[in-house]
Image (cartoon, rainbow, N blue to C red):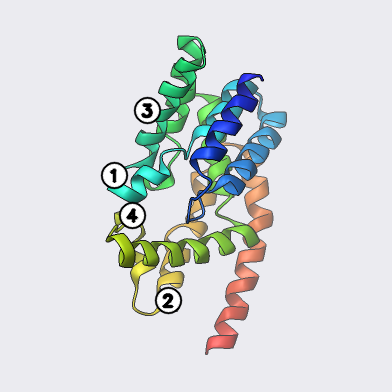
Amino acid sequence: MDLIDETRKFVSEVLKDEPSTHDMSHIDRVESVCIKIHERESGDIKVLRLAALLHDVGIVREHNEGGDHAEYSADIAREFLSRAGADNSLVDHVTSCIRTHRFSRGLKAKSIEAQILQDADRIDALGAVGIFRSLVSMGALRALKQTIGTVKETSMNAYAQDPFEGFGDYMKNKPFKIKDRLNTNTARDIADERLVVMHAYLEALKMETS
C-alpha cells in the first residue's frame, strides 16, 4: 500500500463517526478539487493530496476539547507521516499547508500547495454542497452543545434562537466573502459558478419565508 492509500485508510478510520460536515465525503471532495486546481496551477501533487487527506483529521478532538482543529490536524499528520516513514521535508511541507488552511483564522498560505488547499477547502463551502454542509453543520453543532456542552466560538450563528436568522448571518459572513479570499484564478472561476447557485437559493428562500 502506497502512502496516499495508507493515509486515506487512516483518515477514514479516524473520521468514520464524524457528526458534522468535516467527514470523509468532505475530504474526498477537497482532494478532488485540489487535483483539479493543480492541473492549471501546478505544485507538488503528492504534498497536495496528503495535505488534503489530513487537513481535518483533528476535527474530532476539536469537538471534544474545543481549540483549533487545524493545529490538531497538523500535529496528528506529523505523527502519522513520520511513523509511516515519510522524509522530514515532506512532513514539514504537508503540515505547513494544514496549519494555514482554515478560513476563520485568516492565515496567509505561502506555498502554492498551501494556497490550493485553502482554495479547495473554501470551494467546498460554496454552491449546492455548501448550502447542504452549512445546514448539516448547524444541526450538528447545536446537538454537540446540548449533549456534551461544546461550543464552537467561530460558528456562533449556529446557536441562534431562530435558525433562519443564524443561517442568514452565516451566509453574509462566510460564503459571499470567500471569492475575495481565494488565491488562484482557477478557484475563482469555480467559485463564480457555485455562487450563482447560492444566490438563486437565497432568493427562493426569501420568497418562501416572507
Q: Quadrant of residue 43?
A: top right
Q: Residue at x 42, y 60 (%)?
A: 173
Circle 2 or circle 1, nearest the eye:
1
- Residue 33 versus residue 141: which sits nearer the camera? 141
Mark 3: amino acid: Asp
101 sits to left or right of 31: left
> Earlier along the polypeptide chain: callout 4 or callout 1?
1
Instruction: Give the Cα separation between the discs numbered 4 and 1.
Output: 10 Å
- Which residue in the rendered view is the most extreme toward the bottom? 210
* Amino acid at the residue labelled 4: Thr
**Label 4 secondary element:** helix
Residue named by callout 3: 75
Q: Position of residue 131 (x, y in %)?
A: 57, 64
Who is closer to the viewer here, 34 or 90? Answer: 90
Q: Amino acid at mark 2?
A: Pro
Q: Which residue is mark 4?
A: 154
Q: Earlier in the sequence, mark 1 or mark 3?
A: 1
Looking at the picture, tell me which residue is in the foreground, 133 or 81.
81
- Mark sitting on residue 67: 1
Q: Residue at x 69, y 55 (%)?
A: 193
> Please, what is the three-letter code of the amino acid marked with disc 1?
Gly
Q: Which residue is mark 2?
A: 163
